[in-house]
Image (cartoon, rainbow, N blue to C red):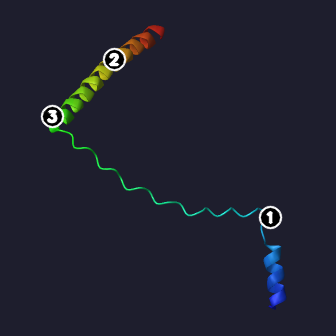
Amino acid sequence: MSEEEKKEKATAYQSSWPRRPERPWERPLPSPTPMPIIPTEDVNRILKQILDRLGAIEKRLEKIEKLLAEKAASST
């Protein structure tokens, strides 16, 4: 195959879609900032508050499930 035939084939199979523009080099991610030192008592207190809130949410969801089950039973 001659050079001219190779060039003709190459131009024949070129895509009509425009090429995707190259992305500029992205900056690397910054290094993570260290967490502040929190006393253990504060961490334990915060975790207890979270657990208390989750418990309250769970109770509300149980009430909602109970109401929905009663409503579904009565409509059947």
Task: Identify which residue, 51 or 37, lies in the foreground.
Answer: 37
Q: Which mark is residue 16?
A: 1
Q: Residues within 10 Å of mark 1 (few under 14, many from 20)?
A: few
Q: Position of residue 12 (x, y in %)?
A: 83, 74
- Disc 3 marks a residue whose amino acid type is Glu
In the depicted structure, whether residue 50 falls above or below residue 12: above
In this rendered view, identify the residue nearer to me: 47 or 63. 47
The amino acid beneath tag 1 is Ser
Instruction: Indicate the secondary structure of the residue bearing disc 2.
Output: helix
Asked whether the residues under the numbered discs 1 and 2 touch, taking CB atoms below 8 Å apart as contact, a structural biologist would say: no
Indicate the secondary structure of the residue bearing disc 3.
Answer: helix
Along the polypeptide, which appears first: circle 1 or circle 2?
A: 1
Residue at point 68%, 62% (across, down)? 21
Q: Are marks 3 and 2 in contact (CB under 8 Å)?
A: no
Mark sitting on residue 1:
none
Q: Is 56 on the left or on the right of 21, as rendered?
A: left
Q: Please tell me which residue is depicted at 48% across the width and 9% down the height of the picture.
A: 75
Percent across and percent down for residue 49 are: 24, 26
- Residue 41's tag is 3
* Residue of label 2: 60
Picture coordinates of residue 54 (x, y %)?
Answer: 29, 26
Where 50 sits versus 2, above or below?
A: above
Q: Quadrant of residue 13?
A: bottom right
